[in-house]
Image: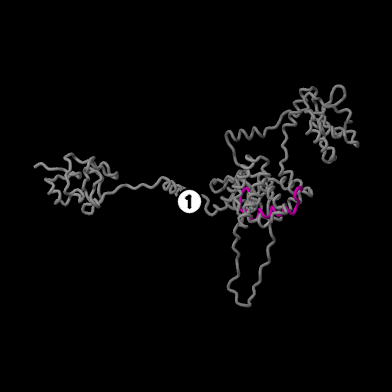
Amino acid sequence: MSGRRCRCSITIASAGDADRDPRRCPGQRGRRFPRERAPDVVQRQGGTHGDAVGAGRTGSRPRYPRGRHRGRRGPGHQDGGRTMTTALRKPAHVMAAEREVERKAEEAARLQELYGDLLPDVQVLRKRGFVVTREGGKFMVGNKLLDRAGVRAMARREGGLAGMSFPRSPTKTVTGLKIGATVALAPKKPATSTPLPTTKEKVLSGAAATAKAKAAQHSADLGTKPRVVWLDLGLLTVDKTYQREVGKAGITHINRILLAFNWNCYQPIVVSERDDGTYAVIDGQHRLEAAKKHPQIDSLPCYIIEAPDVAKQAEIFVAVNSRRIGLTSLQQFHAAVAAKQPEAMEAFGVCRNAGVTILKAPPSYDIPPKSVLSPNTLLKMLRQVGRPAVATAIKLLAETHPETLNAFRSPTIAALCRVVADPKIDAAKVRTVLAATDLAKFYDDTRNGRVTSGGTLETSAERVLRERIAKHREATTT
């Protein structure tokens, strides 16, 4: 008996048998189907209906014959509790977010296992720009090998410089005393300073050891021992073949030396004796010109070396003037504070009263919170707007952004000082606007404003700040 096949590949004798066959899909009963074999279908849950045909395409969408029967499935398309299923996939961004969460959790677990209770201290040191690695039971912080106590001490010291807060150590209290009872307290021990942890020098090997040994080599030829003598100004000459021309900047430098000439700050000039009895000045041309202008100076202390020809003199001139390390503005400022110069002491006092630190060296990356990197900006603002405006500006910035990195940039300080000094602007409004300002976005607007409107970063920052204050005034009045 020849039968027909439905799309589920079940052999039936006639359409009437198909209506009575319990294995038939309800949506297909009573219909005529082509004789050809149906394509693969997906497996169904809870049975083997179509398993042999759909084994190679498990999880894909069902495919049906082309023609008038396409898409005309019965209600529910179920058979004896067996339902068709398709695989659901999450969106790519959801999967990426889940992977990122898992990665962060694994990284946090790894760091916790590696550092244990030292993890908060390690994070403080890394925020301050230090590279922290663990080597056995020790910790390499930068180029220092520290133990656990050393890491804690260094983290508290660096965190204190950055204005970070640390939880206080738990205090011991007396318990079990009755009302009115007294207890004798032990005398307080005198405070002792904790010595810094000693570090062992790292043992180098291979190319690093060779480079260090080469860098520490000393010269074998010291040359002829020089003499220091006082020479008349008329015996000192300058060879123009290799010496620099005294331009506008040179004249300004000479006048500066002349104004502040003092033997305590004078450095002997370097000269070489000539055959005619005169002396060629190799280093110290500006000092010589300043001394010639001073009415009370007729001779100078000179450092006489052996350089018989012009070629040797020019070689020494280049070596002396190219191997100098200039002072940074931070080094100059702290030296001025140590010398108790009035302007430097005033700027230092303004920052100290506001709880702000003036750094001694540039940071490796970001400017720490409540830290100033440009003392020259403070000195300039003190001369332009006065101490009250500068003190108010520094205090406002420290109170509204106590934990913000790069808050005390030079353009921000200058703009805030000028705005606070304006008598038409209320300091309370400045505080409100400053507290609601994202300083990173403010600095981006400052740089963009400089490109579009010109001027310096300081003038652009002042313009942006005044615009924000004006918008705040309009919003509050309407």
Amino acid under disc 1: Ala
Residue drawn at point x = 46 percent, y = 47 percent: 100
- Identify the residue shown where x is 58% and y is 33%: 207
Does residue 259 appear to the left or right of 107 in the view shown?
right
| Residue 337 seen in this snapshot | no
Q: Residues within 10 Å of mark 1 (few under 14, many from 20)?
A: few
User: Which residue lies at the image location 63% right of the left edge and 35% below the top edge?
Assistant: 212
Residue 130, can we see it? yes
Apparent side of residue 8 relative to residue 260 in the rendered image (left or right): left
Query: Residue 238 placed where, x, y %?
Result: 82, 27
Position of 11 with respect to 157 (left or right) is left
Q: Is residue 441 above or below residue 315?
A: below
274 to 25, vertically: above or below: above
Q: Position of residue 384 (x, y in %)?
A: 75, 48
Q: Which residues are magenta?
A: 383-406
Q: Is residue 21 left or right of residue 317?
A: left
Residue that mark 1 sits on = 109
How far across and down, in percent of the image, does residue 39 sit?
A: 23, 40
Main secondary structure of the magenta stretch: helix
Residue 293 lies in the magenta-colored region: no
In the image as oriented, which residue stretches furthest toward the bottom? Answer: 180
Question: In the structure shown, which secondary structural element does the residue marked by tag 1 occupy?
Answer: helix
Dividing the picture into quarters, in which one does residue 284 lie?
top right
Judging depth in this view, the residue of 51 and 239 nearest the camera is 51
Q: Is 66 above or below relative to 156?
A: above
Tell me, what colour scheme is on the image?
A: one colour
Image quadrant where one finds the N terminus: top left
Q: Locate the C terminus by quadrant.
A: bottom right
Q: Residue furthest front?
A: 478
